[in-house]
Amino acid sequence: MIRIVVIEDEPLAREHLVELLSELPGVAVVASVENGRLGLAGIAEHQPDAVFLDIEMPGIKGTELMHMLPDPRPSLVFVTAYPQHAIEAFAGGAVHYLLKPISRVGVAQALSRIRPKDEPLQKEWLRLPVRKKGATRLLRPEEVEALVADLGDCMAWTPEGRLPVDGTLAHWEERLADRGFMRVHRNALVRLDAVLEMTTEDELVLATGRLVISRRRMDEVRRTLGL
């Protein structure tokens, strides 16, 4: 369980960040406060694993608070609208720097910096945020058969239809590398255990549609599928 303190002076931004963190398994927000003074008190009381904090706050700024923490320090993730502080933040030991407006993908990336990649919970956390009927749904990787780049958007092929997903194809290729997904074309990732058939026209048949395999990927795809 990752125990987190959130320090953010804007009430709506603080509430949104807490909501995104609380959606993820293995995460507990143990304190949520509006300024650096209360943040220092919350860190001392709860001894969290990580702190998500704003930079521009009344009183103690986030970059000032960073230098006031005794060792061993929690992992620090800055959440700010100001990109110009990134060098100072990383020089002070921050593990991640989130620019507002924040997204589920950004929060998941931050959490991946806090725990090592071989942490079992990394796989449990991973969700693909898709948009459907004005809401954002979080799908497990096994609920998605393919991810396809379409005119700049990334579409998740699912039994419920083809749904827009936050994040680029390159981002998801990295995140899903150990979840059975493989690049079969410059515009497509496929979950290999969703493949039903490979046609003589070099297409992969899925329950949700067909995808062409590029020539440069053909040998690797065939080898991986045992063909």
Image (spheres, rainbow, N blue to C red):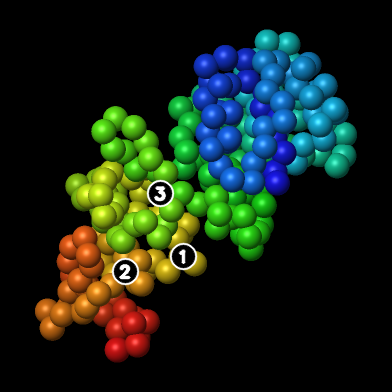
Provide the secondary structure element on which disc 3 rests.
strand
Residue annotated with mark 1:
179
Residue 164: name its quadrant: top left
Vertical relation: 114 (above or below) 79: below
Label placed on residue 194: 2
5 horizontally vs 192: left or right:
right
Secondary element under disc 2, as helix, strand or loop, is helix
Q: Give me the C-alpha separation between circle 3 and circle 1.
A: 13 Å
Q: Earlier in the sequence, mark 3 or mark 2?
A: 3
Q: Position of residue 7 (x, y in %)?
A: 67, 23
* Amino acid type for the residue under numbered disc 1: Arg
Q: Is residue 206 visible?
A: yes
Is the residue under label 2 in contact with that under label 3 (CB below 8 Å)?
no
Where disc 1 sits, the SS reads loop
Q: How many numbered discs, if any?
A: 3
The mark closer to the camera, 2 or 1, is 2
Residue at point 54%, 29% (across, down): 19
- Residue at x 46%, y 35% (from the top left corner): 103
Mark 3 or 1, closer to the camera: 3
**Among all residues in the image, which is located at the extreme left?**
201
Quadrant housing residue 15: top right
Q: From the image, tell me which residue sits under label 3.
A: 139
Q: Residue at x 34, y 57 (%)?
A: 144
The residues bearing labels 2 and 1 have C-alpha atoms spaced at a distance of 12 Å
Image check: 2 left or right of 108? right
